[in-house]
Image (cartoon, rainbow, N blue to C red):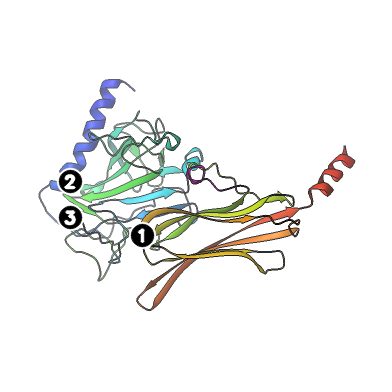
Amino acid sequence: MKAGKAHFSLIYLSLIFFYLLSGAPRTAIAQEGFKLHFPVNCVLHENCFVASYFDLDTQIGYVTDFTCGDISKDNQKGTHIILQDFKDTALNFFVLAAADGEVIAYSDGLPDLVIASGDVHNYPENPCGNGIVLEHDGGWTTRYCHLKNNSLLVKLGDKVKKGQAIARIGSSGQTDWPKLDFSVAQNGYLFDPFSGKTTLEKCGGTISPMWEQPLTYTAFAILKAGFNIGFPDQQKAEIGHLQDYKLIPDITPDLNLWAMLLNVRKGDIISLEILDPEGRIFNSYREEATFDIERHFVYLYTKKKNILWDRGLYTGIIRLERYQGAELHETFKTTTVQLYDQEKALQKQQDQQ
């Protein structure tokens, strides 16, 4: 791609949505016929997650998602769909066109965040990073931001079909995590696809989701969990290099359970538990969160005593609980590891040689 063309597209990509934010109002009613395909080829709540929703509150310093909850960021006018870690950007997670349309703007060639360097790139002229804008019938547009460098599969003027792969998720632009920032607009208004509302309608009341398939709201989640040897390293977990062992020799000096949590809020109860092969509690930890944080790394470190571990299957259970009034909301994740007889395994290997 020629440098001049890339520069023009990058500026246009930024300006077009500034126009949509400030354009003259015509209507704020979403057309029922305009239905959106989920813009990532992942399984929501399993290997990708909505980290934050459209902010329906116009007041500075306040956030309100469509359920009247706080899973958003101030003045966020898109949906942030994240991967489990940075390593997943190497997998086949494609960004998909949400509807039939035409490419009217794009940018490419911006680097992805390298978390190991601690360098969060700052692009004041294009916080979207690498991105694509599609134009659809009825005055609708969709924008796709933070795309992986050099992963775009379309160019200006291309016609695309709903569900067509157009790029890959990355971490370009102003972001500290691999994500897709997906925005929907029509006639000068930005819409929340989970409710079909703009900031004029606020939260609560009747919603009219724009998705062609029903999608559930999730306020918090457990992104990933596993067992490893040695003190778990948070940076390795974020990059995706913290191993999730399924087999560990019984002479291991420690056995450790770790997890990455999403959207922890002050007052949440976090618990980690390891069960031995007999189903008894081997080690456990429980705490109440004292602050709000989008991603929270936790672990349960278990040091070996002066005896061998019991051999067999150990189960890790990570649980996140939140009370809203008297109502309890919770999510949990389980993972397992097999502690095996290393000497017996080595002898068997020698016998087979």
Which residue in the structure is indicated by mark 1?
291
What is the distance, in whole Å, between disc 1 and disc 3 at their CAs?
A: 21 Å
Disc 1 crowd rating (10 Å Cα; few below 14, some 14-19, many 20+) is: few
Disc 2 crowd rating (10 Å Cα; few below 14, some 14-19, many 20+) is: some
* Quadrant in which residue 164 is drawn: top left
- Magenta span has 236? yes
Instruction: Looking at the picture, tell me which residue is in the foreground, 24 or 311.
Output: 311
Q: Amino acid at mark 3?
A: Ile
Q: Marks 2 and 3: which is nearer the front?
A: 3
Report the magenta residues as a range: 230-238
Instruction: Looking at the picture, tell me which residue is in the foreground, 270 or 57.
Output: 270
Q: Is residue 312 left or right of residue 222?
A: right
- Residue 102 visible from this viewpoint: yes
Label 1: element kind: loop
Residue 282 drawn at (x, y percent): 65, 64
Dot placed on the residue nearer the N-terminal end, 2 or 1: 2
Residue that appears at 47% across and 40% down: 89
Dot placed on the residue nearer the N-terminal end, 1 or 3: 3
Instruction: Looking at the picture, tell me which residue is in the foreground, 282 or 54.
Output: 282
Q: Marks 1 and 3: which is nearer the front?
A: 1
Q: Amino acid at mark 2?
A: Leu
Which residue in the structure is indicated by mark 2?
20
Which residue in the structure is indicated by mark 3?
60
Residue that appears at 41% across and 66% down: 268
Dot placed on the residue nearer the N-terminal end, 2 or 3: 2
Residue 260 drawn at (x, y percent): 48, 53
